[in-house]
Image (spheres, rainbow, N blue to C red):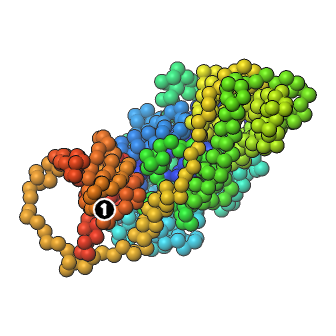
Amino acid sequence: MNENTIPKRYTITSALPYANGPLHIGHIAGAYLPADIYVRYLRLRGRDVAFICGSDEHGAAITLRAKKEGTTPRAIIDEYHELNKATFERFGISFDYYHRTSEPLHHETSQGFFKTLFEKGEFVEKTNEQYFDEEHQQFLADRYITGECPKCSHPSAYGDQCENCGSSLSPTDLINPISTLSGKPPVLRETTHWYLQLDKYQPWLEEWLLEGKKGKWKKNVYGQCSSWLKAGLHPRAMTRDLDWGVDVPLENAEGKKLYVWLDAPIGYVSATKQWAKENGKDWELYWKEQEDPADNARLIHFIGKDNIVFHCIIFPAILHAHEGYILPDNVPANEFLNLEGDKLSTSRNWAVWLHEYLDEFPDKEDVLRYVLLSIAPETKDSEFTWDDYRERNNSELANILGNLVNRMKLLHKYYGGLVPHPEGIEEDTSAQGVLDELQVLIGKVAENVESFRFRDAQTEFMNIARLGNKYLTDEEPWKKWKTDPEAVARILYSSVQLIAALGILAKIFLPRTADKILDILNLSAFPVDWKNLNSRELIGAGHPTKVPEVLFPRIEEEVIQVQKDRLEANKKVKEGEVQDQPQAQVAPAKEEITFDDFQSMDIRVGTILEAAKVKKADKLLQFVVDTGLDQRTIVSGVAEHFTPEEMVGKQVTVLVNLKPRKIRGVESQGMILFAEDSAGKLHIVNPEYAVMKGSVVK
C-alpha cells in the first residue's frame, strides 16, 4: 500500500483479552488505549473504520482457572466477559463491536479456516510424544506446563513462551517441567495432531516481512520478528488435546480442539462478521482482497509485545495460506508497563485493576487515559506510580489545560460570555502568530498519530494549551481592559479559537473532557469534524459561552496514599511478612451445622465505596458497600483495626441476607466477614484475585 494514499477502509483490532480475569492498567496501556486513540483520530477525520475486539474464551488459562476454582469454563468466561466489556465501555474504549470466541459464528468461522487449510494440504498429521498428567489422566496444553526457561533460566516459563525473556518455546524445551494441574512432573505419551508447515512459508515471510516492513514497523516489532525468522521456522501444531474449545472439524479428531492461537486471531474476522450483520455492512470489504488493490482495507493490529510473533508471523502465514485475505499493514506493539518498581502481576495482585479504579475515581477516566498515554511503553518498558499520577493531574491537566479553559471567565467578566468581535485582528501580529502556531501544532498532532507516536501526539495537544496560557500571560488582557479594549477583544477572540481546537482534538485523547469543553463553548450540538480545524475561526464573534467549570480538581496526597498502602500490603503478603498463627492458638470449632444451614447464607463479594467512623462510637465504622445487587450501609465493630481511609476500595465478603438491625441509630444491612487471628487482630476476607461485584461465595 502506498504510504501516501488514504485507504477507503480501516480494520483496527486490539488483542482479544482472556476472559479469565479483570483488566488492569498494563492491558490498557499496551493494546487498548493506543488503538482507541488511533480510531478516534480516524473517525474525526471522517474515515470508514471497523474497531474490533472481543473476549478470548478458549485459552488454557481459562480451563486452568476453572479447575482450580472447582467451576466450569463457561462460568468463568460469562463472568469476565461481562465485567471486561462493561469496564471497556466505562473507560471509553470505543469498540465498534466486542464479540466472544464462544459464539457459534466464531466456531463456524474458525472451523471454516481449518477446513480450507486442511483441504489445501497445508497441514501435516504427526504422531509424537506430548506431556501427560497421570494423576489427572489428560494431555497437557502448553500453558499447563511450567519449568525453567532454557534460554534465560527463568524458573516459571510456560510450555509455549517465557514471559520473562519473550522466547517462544515448546513444552519439551523446558528444564524440569511440572504439570500445573497436579504439581508433579508429567510423563511423555504419544498423541496425534495437525501441524501448520510454517517452514514452508519462511521464504515468503522473509520477503513480505523482513524486506517489506523494514523501516516501516516499530523497531521492537521488526527486531523480534527478525530474530524468530533468522532462527528458522518449524511446523507448529494447530490442534490440542483439550475438553474446552473449538472442535477440530475432522472425523478422526474426537477430543481434539483448535490451538488457541489459530482460533483467537480468527476472532477478529468472526467479530467483524457479526458487526457487519447487525449494521448492514459487508464484512468482506474489511477483510478480503478487492479486485483493485487500492480498495483494500488497511489492517492494523494493536497488541502487547508478548503477542508479536503470533500476529506478525503465525496469523499472517495462516491468512496467506488461506488466500483472499488482506495482511496486516502494521502491528504497532507496545512494550510492558510496570507498577511502582515491580512487574505487574495478576497472581500477586500487584496491579491497578481498571474496574476498581473506575469505582473509586468515577470522574477521572480521562486522568488515567492522560497518564497512561504520557508514560506509554511505546519503545521500552515504562512505569506507573501513584505519585506521578497525582503530579500529572495537578501540574499538567489542572495547571495547564484546566487553567486555560478556566480563563474563559474573562469572557464573562468583560463581554457577558459572548465571543468578542476582533477589530483589526488581521494586522495584530501577536494574534496572527498564535493562530499560525495553532495550525502548526494541529499538524504535529496528526503527523504523530499517523506515525503511531501517540505519546508525542498528546504532548503536542498539550502544547496548544501551553501556547494559550503563554499568550494570555504575555498579553495580560486584564491590564489592557481600561486602556485598550480592542486589544483585549482580539486576545480573547484568539484564545477562544485555541480552546475550541482543544475541545475538538480532546475527542481523540480525553473524550469526556472534550464533551465538557464543547459544552462550555455551547458547541455540543455542532458537528465536530477535523475539517473545522482548518479554519482560523472556529467560533464566530457574538457566540455565547457558558461559565467554565473546573475540569480537573486537584488530587490530594492522602487520596493516593490509600492506593500506595494497598499495594504495600500486597507486597508484604508476597514477601511472607504476614505469617500464619500458631495452630495451638486457633479457636475451637463450633457445633456442626447441616449443608442446608450453610446454603441459606447468601455470601457475596462486594466493594467498599465509602467508610466513616460512627459518631460517639469508638469501635464502629460505617460502610457503603456495592454488593453487585445494590449499594447498602453496613456497620462493623472494626474501628480498632482499620481506618476508614484504608478500607475504601477494598473487596470484601458480605453476608447479604442477614436481617437488618439498628446499631447506634444506623440501620446495618448485612455483615462484612473478617478473620481474627490468635492475637485478636482482624484481617479482611477477600478473594485472591479481583472479581466481579456480586460474585457468590460458595
> How far from the left and from the top, in percent, is residue 459?
72, 47
Camera sees residue 663: yes
Give the vertical position of 271 relative to 245 (above or below): above
Give the residue at x 79% y 32%.
Answer: 481
The residue nearer to you, when weighing 275 against 34, is 34
Query: Toward which corner of the image does residue 330 lie, by quadrant?
Result: top right
Q: At which x and y percent is residue 400?
A: 69, 45
Residue 536, image x, y percentages: 80, 27
Residue on which the image places disc 1: 639
Q: Is residue 293 visible?
A: no
Where residue 625 sits in the image (x, y, percent)? 32, 48
Residue at 79%, 22% in the rendered image: 421
Query: What secondary structure is marked by label 1?
Result: loop
Q: Residue at x 82, y 43 (%)?
A: 474
Which quarter of the rendered picture does the N terminus lie within? top right
Q: Amino acid at mark 1?
A: Ala
The outermost residue toward the front is 482
- The mark tally for this picture is 1
Judge by depth and name the residue closer to the eye, 157 or 474. 474
- Residue 618: name its quadrant: bottom left
Mark 1 crowdedness (10 Å alpha carbons): few <14, some 14-19, many ≥20: some
The answer to which image quadrant residue 320 occupies is top right
Residue at 14% in and 48% down: 600
| Left or right: 31 in relation to 400 | left
Q: Nearer the viewer, residue 57 or 104?
A: 57
Which sits in the foreground, 297 or 122?
Answer: 297
Vertical order, 128 against 480 (above or below): below
